[in-house]
Image (spheres, rainbow, N blue to C red):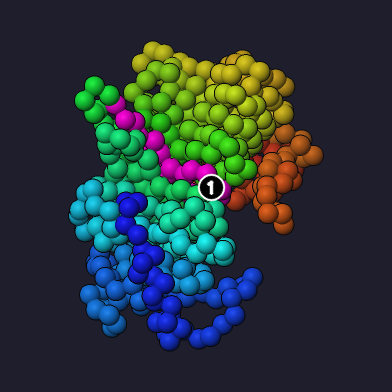
């Protein structure tokens, strides 16, 4: 939904904003307005006056669709916005496939201000999940700047949410991008979000075919920071879970403490153009329609640190094209399927080992330990591969080498000692290869998350 313009509405609302908000200087600490959603119904607010009120100029319920629509008004007038979403399920019911306005289909978050760096946060509150369910009428959320001048100025934060049942189909002219969420030229932080059962569906058009990419999330020309997330049950031709399109800018994708499992694709689970950091994360039991499927395919520089990659059947765990992938302190596992077994690495000189890796074939470069199938003693439970105390990954890495890229005080990732594993359990002294640290006991722990 890209043709509907909000600008003609929003700047006429400046006077209204001034009346309903206290006078505050717009500086490095821009003021913030807060919307608390108070209805599960997918209601429309047709009045762009900055008041979250569906069906009425004032006094109506504040729906999620209304809050996102009014966020654009505040953004245009120099405000950060925070949308609070209490626990429960918010179903999208405003059907209107092919329409170009925010009142139908997916939720359209449009960033407008051309000179300020502003943020919009959509945050689930409480201990139970806040679920946004698109019911397959459209994708769940579409985020973009209205003008080129507004591009790459803004930052959206998604926190404590479940994004599910989004569906976008390709058309004669356009490929399908982002079944759950699509983001274009807006930096995105995703924290404790589950992308579940979303699809970017490629469709045959006459004699041609337009593909689908980013079943869970598709992001282009923007920075992505993803922490403590789960992507499962998503589908696409490329990037069943995650598609990144950023081949030219200095932006990057940083993924930490995240699981990608049970996604289905025609080719890849993570499909990345641009710089990729994958730290303390797990890819496991994803499936594909092709024997040549790939877990992570990177066309730009990639840093795979302290992660566990498992591929089933004749596929490949890691494939690097054009730029070098740096592999460190990770566990790479193959599992036979239908009488076939794949390989861990494919790229030759495009993959470089920084040491500390454990794998069950010799397709990845050394240094590293090759332990052939049958001796792993690792079990997949929930969204993790859990090693037993005598697994070859255990205590493999000396304390001084237990490092990974992570966020410290710097704005960008820094290479520093890695204190915890994917579950935020202590790494201790000698640490394990892969995403999970094993407790120093002689039985397999049961982990609930």
Position of 28 relative to 343 (above/below): below
Q: For this view, does 402 lie left or right of residue 56?
A: right
Whole-percent x and y of residue 276?
59, 38
Quarter of the figure with residue 293: top left
The magenta-colored residue range is: 209-231
**428 relative position to 18: left or right:** right
Seen in the picture, residue 327 relative to 428 is either above or below; the reply is above
Q: Quick check: is 5 in the magenta stretch?
A: no
Which residue appears at 34% of the width and 23% of the height? 289
> Residue at coordinates 39% horizontally, 70% vertically from top-left?
10
Q: Locate residue 364 relative to residue 39 in the image: left or right.
A: right
Asked which quadrant contains residue 58, the reply is bottom left
Q: Residues within 10 Å of mark 1 (few under 14, many from 20)?
A: many
The residue indicated by pointer 1 is: 222
Residue 137 visible in the snapshot: no
Is residue 224 magenta-colored?
Answer: yes
Q: Nearer the viewer, residue 409 or 116?
A: 116
Q: Find residue 358 and report its horizontal and vertical position in percent.
A: 63, 26
Viewer-closest of 139 and 22: 22
Along the viewing direction, whichever of 149 and 101 lies nearer the viewer: 149
In the rendering, at what x and y percent does residue 257 appear? 56, 46
Predominant secondary structure in magenta? strand
At horizontal 76% and vertical 37% (from top left) the residue drawn is: 401
Q: Nearer the viewer, residue 421 or 214?
A: 214
């Amino acid at each position: 939904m890209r043709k509907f313009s909000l600008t003609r509405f929003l700047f006429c609302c400046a006077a209204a904003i001034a009346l309903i908000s206290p006078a505050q200087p717009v500086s490095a600490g821009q003021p913030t307005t807060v919307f608390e959603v108070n209805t599960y119904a997918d209601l429309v607010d047709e009045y762009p006056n900055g008041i979250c009120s569906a069906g009425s100029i004032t006094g109506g319920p504040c729906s999620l669709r209304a809050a996102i629509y009014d966020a654009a008004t505040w953004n245009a007038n120099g405000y950060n916005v925070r949308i609070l979403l209490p626990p429960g399920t918010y179903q999208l019911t405003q059907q209107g496939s092919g329409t170009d306005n925010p009142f139908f289909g997916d939720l359209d978050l449009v960033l407008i201000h051309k000179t300020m760096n502003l943020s919009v946060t959509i945050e689930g509150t409480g201990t139970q999940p806040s679920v946004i369910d698109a019911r397959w009428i459209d994708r769940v959320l579409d985020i973009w700047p209205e003008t080129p001048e507004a591009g790459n100025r803004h930052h959206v934060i998604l926190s404590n949410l479940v994004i599910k049942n989004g569906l976008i189909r390709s058309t004669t002219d356009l490929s399908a991008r982002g079944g759950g969420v699509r983001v274009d030229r807006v930096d995105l932080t995703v924290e404790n979000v589950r992308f579940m059962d979303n699809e970017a569906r490629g469709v045959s058009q006459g004699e041609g075919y337009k593909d689908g990419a980013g079943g869970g999330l598709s992001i282009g020309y923007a920075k992505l920071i993803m922490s403590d997330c789960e992507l499962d049950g998503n589908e696409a031709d490329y990037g069943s879970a995650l598609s990144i399109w950023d081949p030219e800018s200095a932006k990057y994708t940083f993924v930490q403490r995240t699981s990608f499992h049970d996604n289905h694709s025609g080719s890849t689970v993570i499909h990345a153009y641009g710089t990729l950091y994958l730290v303390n994360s797990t890819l496991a039991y994803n499936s594909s329609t092709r024997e040549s499927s790939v877990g992570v395919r990177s066309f730009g520089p990639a840093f795979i640190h302290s992660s566990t990659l498992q591929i089933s059947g004749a596929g490949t765990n890691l494939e690097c094209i054009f730029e070098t992938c740096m592999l460190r302190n990770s566990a790479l596992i193959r599992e036979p399927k239908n009488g076939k077994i794949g390989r861990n690495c494919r790229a030759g000189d495009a993959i470089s080992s920084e040491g500390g890796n454990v794998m069950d074939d010799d397709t990845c470069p050394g240094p590293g330990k090759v332990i052939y199938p049958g001796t792993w003693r690792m079990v997949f439970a929930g969204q993790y591969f859990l090693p037993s105390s005598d697994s070859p990954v255990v205590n493999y890495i000396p304390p001084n080498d237990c490092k990974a890229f992570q966020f410290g005080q710097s704005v960008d990732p820094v290479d520093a000692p890695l204190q915890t594993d994917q579950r935020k359990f202590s790494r201790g002294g000698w640490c394990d290869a892969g995403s999970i640290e094993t407790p120093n006991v002689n039985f397999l722990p049961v982990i609930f998350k």
